Image (cartoon, helix red, strand yellow):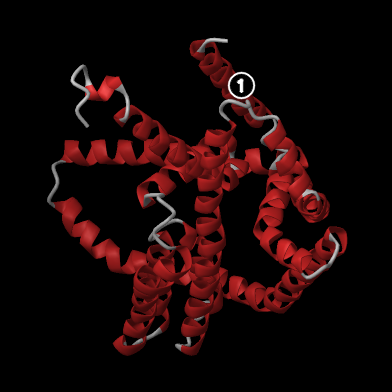
Amino acid sequence: MTREKQTLIWIVGFAAAMFLVHLLSSILMPFVAGMAVAYFLDPVADWLEEKKLSRGIATTVILLAFFILVGILLMALFPLLQRQIVELVAMVPGMAENIRNEALPWLERMIADLPADTLDNIRDAAKEFAGRAVKWVSDVVANIWSGGLAFFNMLSLLVITPVVAFYLLRDWDLITAKIDSWLPRDAAPTIRKQFAEIDQTLAAFVRGQSTVCLVLGLIYGAGLTVAGLKSGLLVGLGAGFISFIPYLGAASGLVVGLGIAIFQFSEWAPIFVVAAIFLTGQTLESYVLTPRLVGDRVGLHPVWIIFALLAGGAVFGFTGVLLAVPVAAVIGVLTRFAIARYLDSPLYRGNTGDP
């Protein structure tokens, strides 16, 4: 078989896989979540196997401990978070009223200086934008809740994910060995090398970045709670959770935290403390946590990660968000491999063959 036909087969197979993922994206979430749990816990299972424990028993022990720990954390945090969510929702009307009172005089002065025709154009544009925004929000809500899909996804996430995680974690080595046996024999060493680099990239990012998010969530939540900020634990954990998107966690937490602090406190000192907590967390993430826990081996640029998350969410929904980083890692590794092959080819060197 010629190289052109092999390339065509790979391209067609990749396109078919992407179409299948798009077609089944509404039901893939528990399977992707189970695969992520299995991948995250596979090193622990390998370690227990080295201690002469069977793979099945090791898998059972690990998953029981993992889901029990997650359940305990959820049961411990849910009452606190529920109360803080209620407090935050109750604060929103007052915050909106304060913003209106502060901004209204400024807007009135600005509007008074505008010509009548310009003012009419602004009103028409505002009405059109408001109509589009309301339609967009209603469409999103309708898509989320239509046909009971949200309830089904939540139920499947709670029921199917542990089952998928168990079987994948138990048979992880068998699955990888079977896939390895399917590789084209001539290209198998090269493909194994690229898979090893992909695994290294994913392990460094997924496991390392998960630890970074957990540490930042604890720092933000504890710091804001000690500072006396209302809904501080909720804001801190939320900011830590979305810190896997570069800079978005600290930025969103800073905006929300400062908004609540300005509404809650009458003095400037607590407001500066809230700002200092997020600035300290971002500094620790940039100079301590990420270099030590994630490292420089990842090779995923922050802009590439943000683009992958947005593209995955736009094309495949929440399932696409879960798949975005692994797919970005695969594309990054294959792109570096393709560039290396190109730099070593006559297409780059030309007829002279100079390096």
Query: Considering only vertical position in the picture, is 90 above or below 138?
Result: below
Observer-nearest of 230 and 307? 307
x, y percent for residue 195: 56, 42
Residue 108 visible in rendering: yes
Q: Can you say which quadrant of the picture contains the C terminus?
A: top left
At 45% from the left edge and 41% from the top edge, which residue is drawn?
333
Q: Can you say which quadrant of the picture contains the N terminus?
A: top right
In the shown orientation, is residue 68 left or right of residue 203? right
Residue 149 visible in rendering: no
At 41% from the left edge and 49% from the top edge, which residue is drawn?
300
x, y percent for residue 153: 74, 46
- Characterize the local packing of mark 1: few (<14), some (14-19) or many (20 or more) Cα atoms within 10 angstroms: few
Observer-nearest of 113 and 266? 266
Query: Considering only vertical position in the picture, is 325 above or below 56?
Result: above
Observer-nearest of 109 and 350? 350
- The quadrant in which residue 145 appears is top right
Q: Is label 1 in a helix, a strand or a loop?
A: helix
At 42% from the left edge and 48% from the top edge, which residue is drawn?
306
Q: How many tags in the picture?
A: 1
x, y percent for residue 126: 34, 41
Observer-nearest of 166 and 10? 10
Query: Considering only vertical position in the picture, is 212 above or below 118?
Result: below
- The quadrant in which residue 285 appears is bottom left
x, y percent for residue 258: 37, 74
Tell me the amino acid under the disc marked 1.
Gly
Q: Which residue is mark 1?
A: 13
